Image (spheres, rainbow, N blue to C red):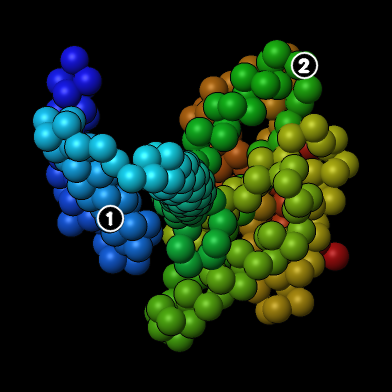
Amino acid sequence: MIEIIVAISIFILLYAAYRCKRCTDLIPERFFGRYWRVMSLLIGFFIFGYAFFEYTLFANLDLINQRVIVSMVLLFGAIYVVLVTSLSYRAFSEIISLQQKTQDYAEHLEAEVKKRTCELEELSITDSLTGLYNQRHLFCKLEEAIVRACRQDSPFFVLLFDIDKFKMINDRDGHLVGDKILQMVGRVVQSCVRDKVDLAFRYGGDEFAIILPDATKHQALKVGHRILRELNDRHVEASIGIVPHTNHHVLDARNLLTLVDTAMYEAKAEGGNRIRFIRPTATRQKPFKVV
């Protein structure tokens, strides 16, 4: 019976030696290679010891210093166990470290993807020349402003203006000069509106629009006058139309833009470089002439 157990143990050790050799061939040299080589040597020692013990059983040999031999086998067995646990600890530590690095890298990639996505979304709604929002985004934000105003019963104002005699400037000085003027107007508009409250857009060509939420008529006119003053200081004139949106006169985005466009062209027809304020009723106020 003992002989059978020892023989089975030898086969198990041979299989362990084979798996250890496969691991040694599989892993890189730097990855605890010396641990696996020592384990292979210990397995070889156990195989030799078990085979020798099997031989003594079949040959009925009496071992000298049997207790010392058994003690040595147990010592090497303890060393083997320590080696296995140490290797397991190092391997699991490396795995956990790699998992953490992988997770950190994945989170970094996810953050980069979100950042790039936001940048692409921002580019898709931004006018590349002036840095303001573009016309497509204007209609989206105007619809949102109308819904919010109706829900919260809070009026907002739409301001629309274009540069007087801009076509003549383009024809006389060229499109590069015209583009520089448009860029300057974009900077002026951004400096005249409330940060993170008002929304400024390039409506198209030399036309610019502003949505002024939660504003009063006085505030809307103040923004219009400030824009005119800043542009006049830079030798540029503009015609501005302003229209409020209230729950008493609910308009959709296109009708609201049509009305403010009418106000702008009335200001232009009256000589330009002025503000025309129109309420969505039959009653209209006189234009505000820039002094």
- Name the side, left or right, on which 176 lies relative to 56: right
| Amino acid type for the residue under numbered disc 1 | Leu
Answer few, some or many: residues within 10 Å of disc 1's Cα (few below 14, many 20 plus, some between 14 and 19): few
- Name the side, left or right, on which 44 lies relative to 251: left
List x then y, in percent, for residue 81. Answer: 44, 41
Asked whether the viewer can see residue 117, the reply is no
Closer to the chain start, of discs 1 and 2, is 1
Image quadrant of residue 17?
A: top left
| Amino acid type for the residue under numbered disc 2 | Asp
- Of badges 1 and 2, nearer the viewer stands 1
**Residue that protrudes farthest toward the right in the picture:** 218
Whether the residues at callouts 1 and 2 have beta carbons within 8 Å, the answer is no
Image quadrant of residue 239?
A: bottom right
Asked whether the viewer can see residue 139, the reply is yes
Between residues 132 and 225, which one lies in front from this camera angle? 132
Which residue is painted at 46% across and 63% down in the image?
128
Between residues 284 and 109, which one lies in front from this camera angle? 109
The N terminus, quarter of image: top left
List x then y, in percent, for residue 183. Answer: 56, 71
Which residue is painted at 63% across and 50% down in the image?
200
> Which residue is the site of mark 1?
41
The C terminus, quarter of image: bottom right
Which residue is painted at 48% across and 82% down in the image?
177
In this view, 145 is above or below 185: above
Answer few, some or many: residues within 10 Å of disc 2's Cα (few below 14, many 20 plus, some between 14 and 19): some
Name the secondary structure under disc 1.
Answer: helix
In this view, 75 is above or below 140: below
The numbered disc on residue 153 is 2
Which residue is painted at 50% across and 33% down in the image?
140
